[in-house]
Image (cartoon, rainbow, N blue to C red):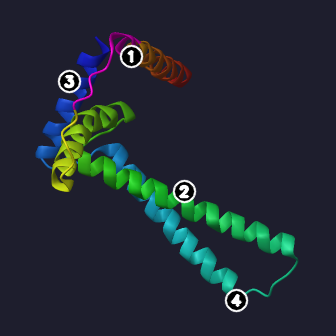
Amino acid sequence: DRSRASMAEAERAEAERAEGVLPKKAVGLVVIGSSGLATFGILARRELGRPLSSPVVVAGRAFGLGSILCLSTFASVAGVVGWSLGVNTLREFADKMRAWAPQKRERFERWLGLPERTYVATPEEEEAWRKFDEILQKAVDDYYSSSSSKKK
């Protein structure tokens, strides 16, 4: 049921992307990231003119500026990637990557001239991966259900 809902959401996002509609979260992340980068530029320029004081103050300022730079860059990159893939959630991103990555890996391996993969997992390995997927899916579902209940 959840996979159907995520597939429907992915199809909706793909249709919006085809129509030229930007995902709201992606645009928000780019705006936040850009404003953070602008803030970093303003604060860094202001700090250049200040005389050096104690090492603790200098370290604190460097940490603060570095944090702004790191978080705003991450937000910008996440927004651009989300927009380019047409996804709004981590679940949509994961679904998109599960379809995209194996194709690209096979193509890259052929380009490198590597032999075709012939490994076949044993039934025990398949069962272990199935259990791992169930545990991971439960953790994701628990996270989303707890975050949605906090919003209410």
Name the residue located 25 percent from the left edge and 46 percent from the top edge: 85
Residue 8, labelled with which disc?
3
Residue assigned mark 4:
49
Name the residue located 25 percent from the left edge and 51 percent from the top edge: 84
**Residues at marks 3 and 1 touching, judged by CB atoms closer than 8 Å:** no
Residue assigned mark 2:
71
Secondary structure at badge 1 equals: helix
Q: Residue 48 location in percent, x, y?
A: 67, 86
Relative depth, front residue between 122 and 104: 122
Mark 3 or mark 1: whose residue is earlier in sequence: 3
State which region is magenta.
Answer: 118-127
Secondary structure at badge 4 equals: loop
Mark 1 or mark 2: whose residue is earlier in sequence: 2
Relative depth, front residue between 71 and 29: 71
Q: Nearer the viewer's eye, disc 1 or disc 2?
A: 1
**126 is within the stretch colored magenta:** yes
Q: Residue 133 location in percent, x, y?
A: 40, 18
